[in-house]
Image (spheres, rainbow, N blue to C red):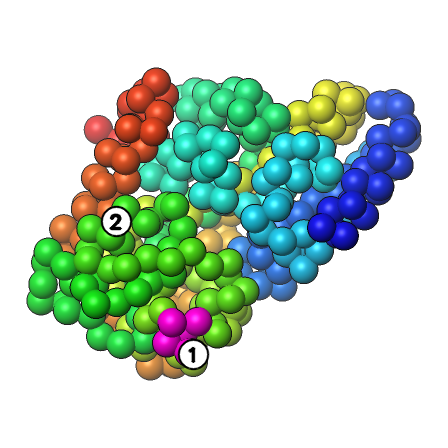
Amino acid sequence: MRAIVTMAAVAAVVWAAPAGAQEVRFKAASFLPLTQSFGVHFKRWVDETNRRGKGVLQIDAVGPEAIPVPEQPNAVKSGVIQMHYGPPTFYTGTMWEGEALSLSERTIKDLRANGAWAYLDKLHQEKMNAVLLAGLGDGVKFFVYTTTPAKADDKDKPMAGLTLRSVPLYRVFFESLGARTVSLPPGEVFTALERKVVQGYGWPRWGIKDLGWLPVTKFRYGPGFFNVNVNVLVNLDAWKKLGAPQKKLLNDMAAWLDDEWPKWREAQNADEDKIQKDAGVQYVDLGAWFSKRAHDAYWEDLAKKSPQHIPALRKLVTKP
């Protein structure tokens, strides 16, 4: 709470200046440390934005050590910070529709072209008081990681008897596999695994070494499901106060990220596979039914939560 108060004071100072000020400073919070996994790529983007934005706009980025992950979405919504980098699963309490991006089969560039991004931007502005500026993660899938073997031959309940760390994104899927689910922030997962409070977790292909989970992880179950989606949100009130040069810079940097992300992804995919293999993590392919169940279960759940928007978004983000 003290960090939030401090950020609020800083925000008040920043926005005491008129929109036409020579240089605007944004405070940004990342859901992961800037030295770990997907946090590294946000820092790459921030560093390039700051390099190009000297005299126009600068971003001061912090991680969850400054603002706890559960508080970050509300911090950007309320304007305590001006920018947030994190997945939509952490703000499902405010809007479920963002999760359509986690089920997307298209690149963000494609979504910009077919109207899906504009649709979701409008919903973010209405429900999150934030502009959906940019995102990354498409093409990186999720898996189930465990410390003990699952019942791989059981196509109905292969995770029966296991307690898995979960988030809203895959809670319904994990429960359909027979697992019990618990909600934990990333920083508490290692201790829970070590103490056998949980026997596994859902996480993308990347980052289990960075987060310290590799030594206690023995199995990875696939095929991969869903789609990593980490959004860059800008507080709507802060956005409206920006001048044309600042808005142009941020829009240009969003387009830059669309082009750069595939290069970053391919390089890291190979590195992460080698890291897991060298550490002895055994990959188990359960078959196509596994990922299909994940998608079917979550689309059905989302449609119940947002019948007005999810069917239309599903058509835009999936391929025929």
Q: Is residue 228 magenta?
A: no
* Residue 56 appears in the figure: yes
Give above or below for 166 relative to 109: below
Local secondary structure at mark 2: helix
Q: CA distance from mark 1 to mark 2?
A: 24 Å
Whole-percent x, y for residue 209 in the image: 48, 72
Q: Residue at x 33, y 39 (%)?
A: 103
Using residue 123 as the reference point, say whether residue 14 is left or right of it. Answer: right
Asked if one can make out residue 250 in the rendered structure from this viewpoint, the answer is no
Q: Which corner quadrant of the image does residue 64 belong to?
A: bottom right
- Across and down, in percent, residue 207 comes to 47, 64
Toward the viewer: 288 or 168?
Answer: 168
Residue occupying image coordinates x 32% and y 49%:
171
- Checking the image for residue 111, the label placed there is none
Q: Which residues are magenta?
A: 192-197
Residue 223, x across and y down, in percent: 23, 57
Q: Quadrant of the C terminus?
A: top left
Mark 1 belongs to which amino acid? Glu
**For numbered disc 1, what is the local secondary structure?**
helix
Label 1 environment density (alpha carbons within 10 Å; few <14, some 14–19, many ≥20): some
Q: Is residue 87 left or right of residue 203?
A: right
Q: Are marks 1 and 2 in contact (CB under 8 Å)?
A: no
The residue pinned by badge 2 equals 173
Q: Badge 2: how crowded within 10 Å, few (<14), some, or many (20+)?
A: many
- Give the side of residue 26 with respect to residue 96, left or right: right
> Residue at point 10% right, 58% down?
155
Q: Residue at x 19, y 46 (%)?
A: 293
Q: Amino acid at mark 2?
A: Phe
- Which labelled disc corresponds to residue 194? 1
Q: Position of residue 164 (x, y in %)?
A: 33, 62
